[in-house]
Amino acid sequence: MTAVTRTALLFSLALLLSCGDSAPRSVDIAIEHVTLIDAINPIRENQTVLIDDGRIVAIVNSDTKGRVSAQTTVDGSGQILIPGLWDFHVHFTFDTRFTDAMAGLFLYHGVTNVRDTGGLLEDLLPVVDTLQRSGANAPSIWYSGPLLDGADVVYDGVNFPGLGIANPTPEAARANIAEIHAAGASFLKIYEMVSPEVFAAIVDEARLRNLPIDGHVPLSMRARDVAPQVQSLEHLRNYEMDCVSEPEIWLAARQQQLANTANEPGNVLRTRLHELQRLTAISNEDPEVCAEMTEALKATVSVPTLRMNSMDLHIPFMREDFDQAMQMIPHS
């Protein structure tokens, strides 16, 4: 990937598609003779993109752009300019060995907007401050703050990285959301161990505060009941448990286990429930029931995180470009 291509990838889709054809007389940057590809227009060849004060202000044909002076002119001949990409599922603080390198790696690969979907405020806010600092070479970031888990927490900072917080009661959930909202979070993230009562409180509080909700399908609920109440769901996970005959029986079995009378760590309990039901549900799918569940999913956005779900099929270290990619990660 050339430097021109990497630079080109830094422009957002909204800006690229909203520009008119009238060119200003003077701009900061002009990318000339470039081919434009976006999700709406046909391929546009031999275009000049004019950027001023960090924004695309015009897109004109390179042969007819008229007299426009630019402080910096980039020859885009033979290059393709596309809108900046999104990574919709990021955890900047999941492994702090990589935190400092992530922003630069996103930009290198053309990712200009990211959504951090879970991190403790005390860990995440300093990262956000760095990314949002004036002049920072970083993507724009939207963040949820901590995973809103149940009385038991999967990512508890002991057995798993510290990404989640406990919400044993609706009142605790509302108090936690108040703190998260005050910290500037863009949305909330519901996790797998919440009870139906806590889920309802989170949905209500999010509505009162005009905060979108992302999440996993809680193990205490059915996907068809969760989807219409949230704006997005991650990983296509726990859908399969609502695709079987008599799914309410499967749900009752999970709810009994979630009482956690053995006081298992949250991550152990979740893993055990996944092992008990997920693969079994897939092999016992009822197409008619699954169609009903899928219909309910139309009410939200499913974020498939395909790369994570395909790790066993396309093993990273077996890729031809693995060594090259590793060279871009700072040595500890």
Image (tube, rainbow, N blue to C red):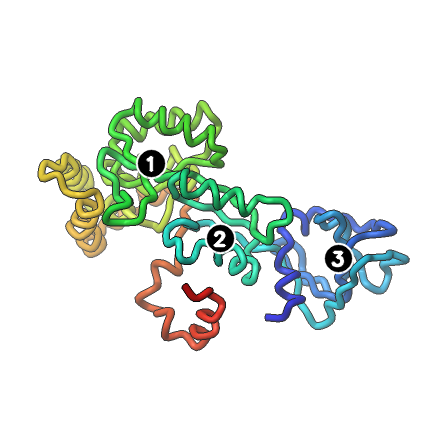
Along the horizontal axis of the image, is 103 left or right of 189? right
Along the horizontal axis of the image, is 35 left or right of 22? left
**Residue 298 in view in this figure:** no
Amino acid tagged 1: Leu
Amino acid tagged 3: Val
Pick the front one: 297 or 134? 134
Q: Is residue 72 above or below residue 77?
A: above
**Which mark is drawn over residue 49?**
3
Q: Can you identify the residue that label 2 sits on?
A: 87
x, y (%) of residue 134?
Answer: 63, 45
Report the residue at 50% width, 33% height from top. Answer: 184
x, y (%) of residue 197?
Answer: 27, 26
Pick the front one: 35 or 31? 31
Q: Can you identify the residue that label 1 sits on?
A: 148
SS at mark 2 in the image: strand
SS at mark 3 in the image: strand
